[in-house]
Image (cartoon, rainbow, N blue to C red):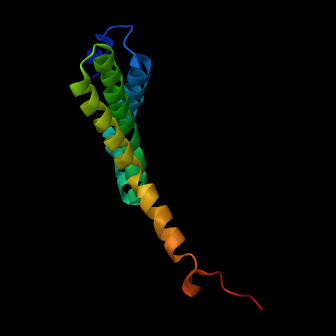
């Protein structure tokens, strides 16, 4: 992916952001390729697996935004709109677990069983 991104025009808007995000995603994926690192992350908590996927999602969103801006500047609004939609949906996908958790916490925080125990 980095080779393909590096071949894009240097004046492409957000090219640096896309390259940086893709580099971080590559480093994360390379580190987690080793079972000694991957297995403890997978076994520890689902939240860690979600967090480990964030660099890949960020790279996808950054690439979609860069290509969207390039398409818009070239006057090709059809692909630009779809790429912007892709970036937004990827962002929602990345944030959804946090949004659901916060919603649950807010919904149930007032319940009696969710209150701290009284100490005498």
103 versus 33 height, above or below: below
Residue 114 versus residue 71: which sits nearer the camera? Answer: 71
Q: Residue at x 31, y 24 (%)?
A: 68
Residue 20 versus residue 81: which sits nearer the camera? Answer: 81
99 versus 69 height, above or below: below
Choose top left, top right, bottom left or bottom right for residue 113. bottom right
In the rendered image, residue 34, in percent from the top left (x then y), is placed at 33, 40
* Residue extending furthest toward the right: 120
In the rendered image, residue 79, in percent from the top left (x then y), is placed at 22, 26
In the rendered image, residue 66, in percent from the top left (x then y), is placed at 35, 22
The C terminus lies in quadrant: bottom right
Residue 16 versus residue 43: which sits nearer the camera? Answer: 16
Residue 101 versus residue 48: which sits nearer the camera? Answer: 101
In the rendered image, residue 98, in percent from the top left (x then y), is placed at 46, 56
* Residue extending furthest toward the top: 10
* Residue extending furthest toward the left: 78
Q: Residue at x 71, y 87 (%)?
A: 118
The N terminus lies in quadrant: top left
Q: How many marks?
A: 0
Can residue 29 be seen from the camera position used here?
no
Q: Residue at x 31, y 20 (%)?
A: 72
Can residue 102 be seen from the camera position used here?
yes
């Amino acid at each position: 992916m980095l080779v393909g991104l590096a071949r894009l025009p240097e004046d492409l808007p957000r090219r640096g952001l896309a390259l940086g995000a893709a580099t971080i995603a590559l480093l994360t994926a390379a580190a987690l390729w080793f079972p000694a690192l991957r297995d403890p992350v997978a076994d520890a908590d689902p939240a860690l697996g979600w967090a480990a996927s964030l660099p890949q999602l960020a790279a996808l969103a950054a690439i979609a935004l860069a290509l969207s801006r390039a398409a818009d500047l070239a006057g090709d609004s059809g692909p630009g709109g779809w790429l912007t939609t892709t970036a937004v949906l990827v962002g929602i996908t990345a944030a959804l677990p946090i949004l659901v958790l916060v919603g649950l916490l807010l919904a149930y925080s007032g319940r009696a069983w969710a209150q701290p125990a009284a100490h005498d």
